[in-house]
Amino acid sequence: MSALAAPPRPLSVVEPEAPAGARIVRAHRLPPGVRRVSRYLLTSGVSTVVSEVTLVAVLAIRLLPAPAAAMAATITGGMVSYALSRYWIWADADRRRAGLQLVLYWAVTVAGMLLAAAATDFAADHARGAHPARVAEAAAAYLATYGLLWIAKFLVYQRVIFRPAASPDPA
């Protein structure tokens, strides 16, 4: 290797600012907007798996009726989602607003939870077939509700809840 040759570029970069377990390896730096949406997508995937497993398990063993099972699933997935949202997706959010962020986040979560509970209840009430088929239809309705809310929730999180700290005015 000559003295003028550039050192070899690493094949991947591990994000040191990501929390343990949420670190991702990627070939290059993504633009901030793409990185944020990618992280939101990954967080949504994790919280969806957690909430769907909770929903199906609770319904399958007949622990709760469909609306209550949907609420339990939303709360379970919401805890995972909040932690990843606040500390990984929107790590630059204004930390002086932590209490307000928590209240607003759960207000959005409760609104989605009520919609998901209604959709899950409707699907379970109108499902035909044996218990496994009713569980599958309720789970599909739950997932579809959150799929429809995905973009709206991102925009609320981005523009209202997890806004970055305001830059001080240079005076």
Image (spheres, rainbow, N blue to C red):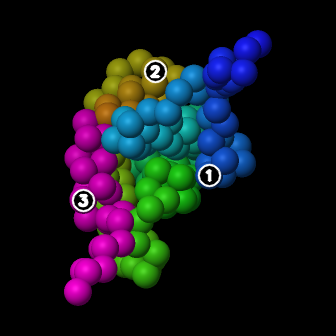
> Which residue occupies the extreme top position in the image?
1
| Mark 1 or 2: the one toward you | 1
Residue labelled with disc 3? 159
Which residue corresponds to the image point at 53% horizontal and 27% vertical from the top-left?
28
Q: Nearer the viewer, residue 105 or 163?
A: 163
The percent position of residue 11, horizontal first and vertical second, equals 66, 20
The percent position of residue 13, horizontal first and vertical second, equals 64, 32
The percent position of residue 139, horizontal first and vertical second, equals 43, 32
Which residue corresponds to the image point at 66% horizontal and 18% vertical from the top-left?
5
Which residue corresponds to the image point at 44% horizontal and 48% vertical from the top-left?
70
Compare marks 1 and 3 and give the one earlier in the sequence: 1
Q: Nearer the viewer, residue 101 or 27?
A: 27
Q: In the rendered structure, are the residues bearing label 2 and label 3 in contact, judged by CB atoms less than 8 Å apart?
A: no
Residue labelled with disc 1? 17
- Where, by quadrant of the figure, is residue 62 drawn? top right
Question: Is 91 placed above or below 146 here?
Answer: below
Amino acid tagged 1: Glu
- Between the C-alphas of marks 1 and 2, the distance is 43 Å
| Residue 168 falls within the magenta-colored stretch | yes
Compare marks 1 and 2 and give the one earlier in the sequence: 1
Residue 114 visible to the viewer:
no
Residue 90 visible to the viewer:
yes
Name the secondary structure under disc 2. helix
The percent position of residue 151, horizontal first and vertical second, equals 26, 41
> Which residue occupies the extreme right position in the image?
1
